[in-house]
Image (cartoon, rainbow, N blue to C red):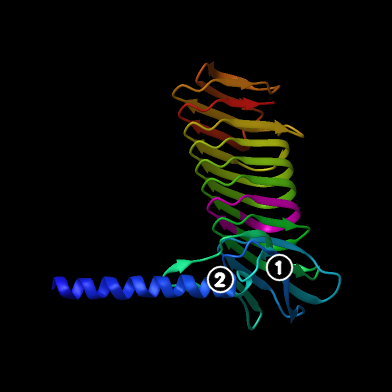
Amino acid sequence: MKVFIKWVSLVFIIGILGTLVSLQVTGAFSQEIVDVFEEKKVKGSSIKYLSVDTSSADIDIVQSQDDTIYVQWGGKASKGVWEDYELNTTKKGDELSVKLRQKDILGFQFGFIQKDLKLTVRLPKKLYEGLTLSSSSGDIRVNDQHSNTVSIKTSSGDMELAKIKISEEINTRSSSGTIRLKEVYANRFLTDTSSGDVVGETMEVAQIIGDSSSGTIDFSELMLTGDLEIKTSSGDVYLQFAQVPDSFIIDYESSSGDERVNLDGIDYERKAEHEVKGQKGSGDQRIEIRTSSGDFRAQ
C-alpha cells in the first residue's frame, strides 16, 4: 500500500512539474502585459431573458446603439493568460446565456497577472423579461436598462445599478461586496448581504426587504410607496426620504442600538433609546427595523 501511495505521489508531482513547464512555455508566468479583445454578436430582437455568469471578471451591462447584442470580452492581461479563458454564448429560444470560465489545469486555475479584464454585454434598448447576473470576485455594473426582473449575485465583488426601471423585482445578494444604487425605479427591492454595505440614492420603490449582518443600509432621496422591512445585526440603518409617506406605522427595536427619528406628524406610542413605535395617519404603510446593535436614523 505504501509503495502504491509513493507511486501516486510521484506521478502527481511529475504532472505538476509538467504543467508548470507548460505554463512557462506558453507565457502564463510572463510579466508582459498585452491588450486582448474578443467579440460575439447575437441578433437581439427575439431575446427576452439574459443570464451572465463569470468567475473573476467584471461584468458591465450597457445599452447598444442598434438591435444587436454585443458580447465583448477583453482588457489587459499577462501574455499567455488570455488563452486560459473560454467565452461561450448559447441561444435557446428567447434566452441568451453568456458564460466566461477560466480553464482548470489539474484542479487549479492559473492566471497570475491580470489587469482590467472585463466582460461587457451591450443590449438593445427595450423591455426584457429577466436579467440574471452572477460573479464570484468580479464587480457587476448595470446601467440604463428596463426589465421586469433583475437578479444579481456576487461573493466579494461590488454591484452598481444606475438608471434602471424594473417593473417587478430586483434581487441582490452579496457577501462582502458593496451594493450601490442610483436612480432606480422598481416595484420590489430585495437585498441580502453579510458585511457589504447597501447604499441607495434617488430610489422610487413600492416595497423594500433588506437583511444584513454587519453591513450598513443607507437610503437617501427615497420615495417609498409601500412597506419597508430591514433586519441587521451590527449594521446601521439610515433612511432619508425625498418625501415622507403620508400614512405609515413605524416600528424599530434593537438590543443596544440607538435611534434618531426626525419625522413630522407621528403619534408615538413609545420612543425610547432602543425602541420606537408610532403611527402617522391611518398607518397604510409599514416601516419595520430590527437590529441587534445597529443604530437607526430616519428623516
Mark 2 or mark 1: name the one nearer the start of the chain. 1
Q: In which quarter of the image is residue 278?
A: top right
Q: Residue beneath label 1, please?
A: 74
- Asked whether the viewer can see residue 98, the reply is yes
Relative to 221, is 10 on the left or the right? left
Secondary element under disc 1, as helix, strand or loop, is: strand
Task: Please name whichever residue, 10 or 200, is drawn nearer the observer in this view of the structure.
Answer: 10
- Asked whether the viewer can see residue 102, the reply is no
Q: In which quarter of the image is residue 226?
A: top right
- State the quadrant of the C terminus: top right
Q: Residue furthest right?
A: 65
Relative to 62, is 10 on the left or the right? left
Instruction: Identify the mark at residue 124; answer none if there is no mark.
Output: none
Relative to 65, is 189 on the left or the right? left
> In the image, what residue type sits under mark 2?
Arg
Distance from label 2 to label 1 (Cα)? Answer: 13 Å
| Residue 123 x %, y % | 76, 69
- State the quadrant of the N terminus: bottom left
Q: Does the magenta stretch include residue 31?
A: no
Residues packed near mark 1 inside 10 Å, few (<14), some (14 to 19) or many (20 plus): some
Q: Is residue 155 magenta?
A: yes
| Residue 16 x %, y % | 40, 71
User: What's the residue at 41%, 71% (across, down)?
Assistant: 17
Chief SS of the magenta region: strand
Residues shaded magenta? 152-170
Instruction: Identify the mark at residue 101; answer none if there is no mark.
Output: 2
Residues packed near mark 2 inside 10 Å, few (<14), some (14 to 19) or many (20 plus): some
Task: Please name whichever residue, 57 or 31, is drawn nearer the observer in this view of the structure.
Answer: 31
